[in-house]
Image (spheres, grey):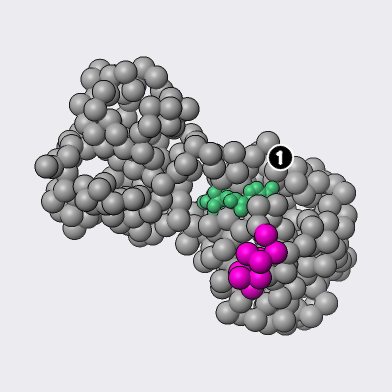
Amino acid sequence: MTTSAAFAMQPLLLPELFPPDLRHRLSLVTRTDERVIESFDGPLDVEILITGWGCPRIDADVLAAAPRLRAVVHAAGSVKGHLTAEVFDRGIAVSSAAEANARPVAEFTLAMLVLAAKQAIVKARAYSTRGWSGDPLPGVATPSEGGGLIGAVVGVIGASRVGRLVMERLRDHGAHILLSDPYISPAQAADLGARPVPLDDLCREAELVTVHAPALPETRGLLDERRLALLRDGAVLVNTARGSLIDTDALVRHCATGRIGAVLDVTDPEPLPFGHPLLALPNVLVTPHLSGARGRELRRLGEFAVAEVERLARGLPLRGAVRPADLDRIA
Ligand SMILES: NC(=O)c1ccc[n+]([C@@H]2O[C@H](COP(=O)([O-])OP(=O)(O)OC[C@H]3O[C@@H](n4cnc5c(N)ncnc54)[C@H](O)[C@@H]3O)[C@@H](O)[C@H]2O)c1
């Protein structure tokens, strides 16, 4: 029996997430309403909601108007922004394409780690301001080797979906990986090719530190004044996770001395106000939260969601199932 579905997201995203071939695949397993829901008002007579960025919150009132709803398939990352506890309480199956969104973040992170390990950021700025010297900027420390990722000690905070993909790539580049994650056993860390260490030790030992833990109450300010002070001279901190994990004022202080550098795709606050010191420091590169899926990369999220709807139609388990018990440790 064919199921029925509706899209709920920013309508502009729909053609990029679900180009014609994916819409065709969907049509083989479900009748999908042509209208993209931007706000929930009135009855919602579908079994599956295919959601994306911009989906309004699905609360008790929305659920009361959707008696047949049995699955929410999210063609984006975290479901915490639009799903309420009532969705899980009613036993509605929830899936997220966070796994598909992790890939571009990991690719971007690796690119930034390669640049940082080559001292490319500070050297490019020295080149443009002081000419072809190859010397680091005065007062700006650089990692002792500057010889790329091979043999570099890289600290990974969080064996999350992104963190695991980053570790996979770091292994290929011959880096030594230190991992801090309270949910990972030593045996699991070994399987990931990493040495498990307490976070303080990671800060002391790593030449490069990359942040991949979720924003949770207990990870707010995880890298605070004290831990930033533990970082080695010349260490570079890469954050593609969430700005709240780093104390911004403390980071400004440590980067302003030139002792450490940073690559930040996410900040707190976000966006940074115009003229913020992090935007001007020569040893800090800030990008406007662009490492997740964009443009052509969005199709992967749509593909993931379509495969989930196909699994629902065949009665198979969801690959991106979000379990309520995991909510307090996932993004
Ligand atoms: N910049 C972007 O565009 C972008 C895009 C996607 C995700 N993100 C961010 O990247 C991060 C990872 O996303 P994900 O989907 O891979 O996360 P995820 O949901 O897979 O992460 C969950 C895992 O993080 C680990 N973890 C939890 N608490 C931890 C802690 N205190 N210390 C260390 N590890 C801890 C645990 O292993 C847990 O299972 C998140 O912060 C997410 O918001 C950013």
Three-letter code, disc 1: Glu
Q: Is residue 306 left or right of residue 139?
A: left
Q: Is residue 56 left or right of residue 236?
A: left
Q: Is residue 119 visible?
A: no
- Magenta includes 189? yes
Q: Say which residue appears at 32% left-offset and 18% top-offset.
A: 64
Vertical placement of residue 301 versus 188, above or below: above
Q: Nearer the viewer, residue 107 or 131?
A: 107
Q: Which residue is mark 1?
A: 218
Q: Secondary structure at mark 1?
A: helix
Vertical placement of residue 99 versus 53, above or below: below
Q: Say which residue appears at 22% left-offset and 51% top-offset.
A: 314
Q: Say which residue appears at 53% left-offset and 57% top-offset.
A: 161
Residue 255 lies in what quarter of the image? bottom right
Vertical placement of residue 38 versus 75, above or below: above
Disc 1 beta carbon < 8 A from ligand 1?
yes
Q: Quadrant of the N terminus?
A: top left
**Where residue 34 sits: x, y (%)?**
17, 37
The stretch in magenta equals 185-193
Q: How many marks?
A: 1
- Magenta includes 164? no
Q: Main secondary structure of the magenta part?
A: helix
Vertical placement of residue 303 versus 144, above or below: above
Q: Is residue 250 visible?
A: yes
